[in-house]
Amino acid sequence: MPRFEPFSALRYASANLDDVIAPPYDVLSDADVDELEQRDRYNIVHVDVPRDRDGDARYHAAGERLRSWMADGVLARDPEPTFTLYRMAFTDAAGTAREIVGVLGALEVVDEGAGEVLPHERVTHKASTDRLDLTRATLANMSPIWGLSLASGLTRLLTEPGEPVGSVEFDGVVHTVERVSDPARVAAISAMVWTDDVLIADGHHRYGVARRYRDEMRQETGSHETSAELTLAFVNELVGDQLSVEAIHRVYRDIGHDDLVAALSVGFDIAPAGTVSSATLSEMDRRRALCLVDRSGQGSWLTPKPGAFASVRALDGVWLEHLLDHTPATVTYQHGVSELQTLIEADHTVTAAVLIRPVSVAEIERTAREGLLMPPKSTFFTPKLRTGLVIRLLD
């Protein structure tokens, strides 16, 4: 099972967290970065999303900036290895109040296919080396991956508060961090995570970057004992009452509308659904149907035909792959109904989209236990972790 260890965390020494932390880099638009850069000259995006130089020079500048913040006392390192409890309190899209409690620590980087740290979905290829270049320049893990521990009982070890570090609210979500330095409690948390597999919920690409950086360090040093053997991770127990999992919808191009409908009709009964709105999602659950959205914003219910998917896993994304893999259709992904509608209106290359239903926590666990993989972009875990609450140095 994977090692999960405390480390001497690098934290903002006295800043207002509201001014200096940020969403993860991969959900930020240029306008978002503009706003965060202007909010505070020490906002973490100045390091995590460097834009003030061209080419590779921006990564060197990010590394120098991080080191200068440490030298000037903007960032201070814990004097001893610690874990950081991280709580997110929020109300989900269905109106249910939830609190996720997990722990920030250093998770072992294992070889692909070796088990222990498991993907839950196939990963779309990313050619960019941005995160690897940033890791090399800063010698730091900036944004954590999100891991779901299959170890029953982890939540119980995290319930008791730790030493308060800070709390901040973003978009209705209260993010609270607490330091845990007591050796007995640190050892208990580490040992609990070590008892079972960890499933990657978010950050598959970041974990792949950590693997590439680890391999570089092994080749450079000849050692398997460097800090690159682990990476920054937020780990919480895979339990349904905490997690909020939303769907990522499918957007289709490179196929005519009639051909798309014909391919879908092999497995679905298709009926008018009217104008699509956020209420469509709850109606999909009631009908046990998907919804095809055309360029005018009108929907069609896609109700599975009896027996059509008898030999296929009962996942919306798998059903769509089963019907469309042998067509010329290309697929991209979009979270949120309103965001999807905006995309369809603005991008005339889009043929149509399909709204799918969220994957259940039970299905996520079954996937992990059976060693299976869902299609790419099957799950959207919310809320998103913030960057800058904890930094892990690679020294």
Image (tube, grey):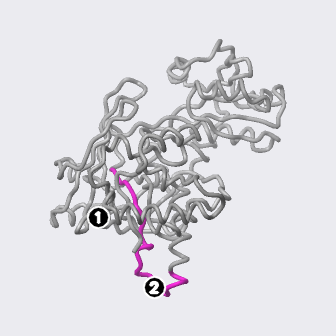
Instruction: Please provide percent x and percent y for residue 368.
Output: 47, 54
Disc 2 designates what residue?
Answer: 223
- The amino acid at mark 1 is Arg
Q: Amino acid at mark 2?
A: Ser
**SS of the residue at dot 2?**
loop
Across the whole image, how many numbered discs are drawn on residues?
2
Quarter where residue 16 is shown: top left
**Which one is nearer the viewer's eye here, 366 or 209?**
209
Decide whether residue 96 is among the magenta residues: no
Residue at the (67%, 33%) spot, across then down: 308
What is the x, y in percent for residue 205? 56, 57
**Of pointers 2 and 1, the one earlier in the residue sequence:** 1
Name the quadrant of the C terminus.
Answer: bottom left
**Residue appearing at x 68%, y 18% in the figure:** 297
Does 338 sit above or below residue 136?
above
Is 92 in front, or is 19?
19
Residue beneath the point at 21% across and 53% down: 157
In the displayed structure image, the side of residue 155 where residue 119 appears, left or right:
right
Q: CA distance from mark 2 to mark 1?
A: 25 Å
Q: Residue at x 41, y 54 (%)?
A: 147
Q: Which residues are magenta?
A: 218-236
Is residue 93 rendered to the left or right of residue 175? right
In this figure, which residue is indicated by the disc labeled 1?
A: 77
Secondary structure found at label 1:
strand
* Quadrant housing the N terminus: bottom left
Q: Measured from the top left, where is residue 349 in percent x and y?
A: 79, 32
